[in-house]
Image (tube, grey):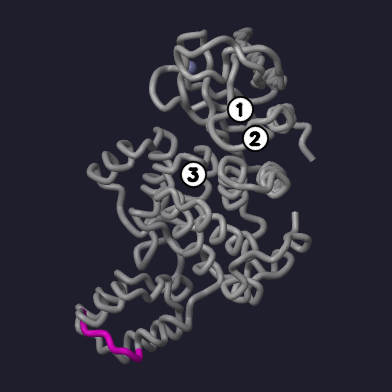
Amino acid sequence: MTGSQRRPGPVLGALCLAALLSGAGGAQAERQGPRRPLTRQALVNLVRLGWLADEDLSREIAGRRLDFAVTPEVERDLRASGATDSVLEAAKSVRAAGPGGSAPDGAVPLSKDEVIALLKSGQTADAVEAQISARGAAFMVSRQTSDEILAAGGSRSLLGTASVTRKGAAVFDDLLDAAVAAANANSTTHAEQLLEQAAKIRPENAAVHSLLGHSRFHFGADPALAAEDIAAAIRLGGWVSYRMRHVHSLSEKCTGVLFVSLSGIAYRADRGNHSFELRRPALIEAHALSGKSWFSMADGQAPPIIASWLHIKLKSPKGGEKEMDFTLLGGLRGPSWYEAVANTINAKGE
Ligand SMILES: [Zn+2]
């Protein structure tokens, strides 16, 4: 899904940078250079947001690597933020980035911590600046970063070189991490602007479309845009997610996130034991239903109202069978949206 037919957004200035860096095809993606490793905070933010399925999150972790070691303390931190076993496994198994990583020296842009370590090891600011010129900088030169590097013995000239040697992939990662931080702070409009720019740099990245699709579906005003990104994420082999209420009975409900991809379906309950994951070729069938129902009512309220909901039928090859009902939480909730979700689940999207 290209952005060529979208109307211009309110972020034209920033988009010019994205336009310079974006382009069609894989050659462009290669020229963007390596992805920037995830910081601890960026990974915690991604996990806490909870919009990405484990598989997409693990793919991001493997593609970017981490600029920190997964110590028991980090593991506790990630788990407290909602990380599942499989995501923790992905984080633990990925080789740490930087000098100890798998890439040959010189191929990986220098991280902020590496620059500070080099300066503290006694190298001159000029020598470190020469290395930044050769390898590029893997960090954004913010006020805080500048202060830290200057305190370690860096120079203004070094900071200038670092800020002009940013690589396309690193800009993409900056935008992605900033967007996830913004979404965590409920600034979804800002998050969407950042994600739009990121999607233009790396239109082949499923995660960015998945995040955009989720945000636009639940917080956006333009249903067509949400549908574009949801379709793009699915087409790229990614998962999309919807905030849902799982309706057990009139009085019993739980909330969570429903994840859908061409390969299967999963529900992660905020708490409680209704989480599940089912992979095709299991029967996964969804129907959008509408009628007089108590599904959309707040707890303990008034008589049934006309509502829409999603009815999902699951049948594992081993014989297990399950039928579940869900209502969307927040955002677009009309009957057509339940149909769109059902089509995505039934793999009848675009
Ligand atoms: Zn439930």
- Mark 2 and mark 3: Cα distance apart in space: 15 Å
Compared to 191, does 345 lie above or below? above
Q: Amino acid at mark 3?
A: Ser
Residue 151 coordinates in the image, percent (x, y) = 20, 80
Q: Closer to the N terminus: mark 2 or mark 3?
A: 3
Residue 58 numbered tag: 3
Q: Indicate if the residue with disc 2 has its beta carbon within 8 Å of ligand 1.
A: no
Would you say residue 78 is visible in this rendering?
Answer: yes
Compared to 165, does 218 lie above or below? above
- Mark 1 and mark 3: Cα distance apart in space: 17 Å
Residue 228 coordinates in the image, percent (x, y) = 72, 48
- Which residue is label 2 attached to? 261
**Residues rendered magenta in the picture:** 152-157
**Left or right of residue 248, residue 322 in this image:** right
Q: Indicate if the residue with disc 1 has its beta carbon within 8 Å of ligand 1.
A: no
Residue 213 coordinates in the image, percent (x, y) = 62, 45
* Majority secondary structure of magenta residues: loop
Q: Amino acid at mark 1?
A: Ile
- Tally of numbered discs: 3
Under circle 1, the secondary element is strand
Q: Closer to the N terminus: mark 1 or mark 3?
A: 3
Q: Nearer the viewer, residue 333 or 173?
A: 333
Under circle 2, the secondary element is strand
Q: Quadrant of the C terminus?
A: top right
Q: Amino acid at mark 2?
A: Ser
Q: Is residue 120 magenta?
A: no
- Mark 1 and mark 2: Cα distance apart in space: 6 Å
Residue 88, picture quadrant: top left
Q: Quadrant of the N terminus?
A: bottom right
- Which residue is label 1 attached to? 265
Would you say residue 31 is visible in this rendering?
Answer: no
| Residues at discs 1 and 2 in contact (Cβ within 8 Å) | yes
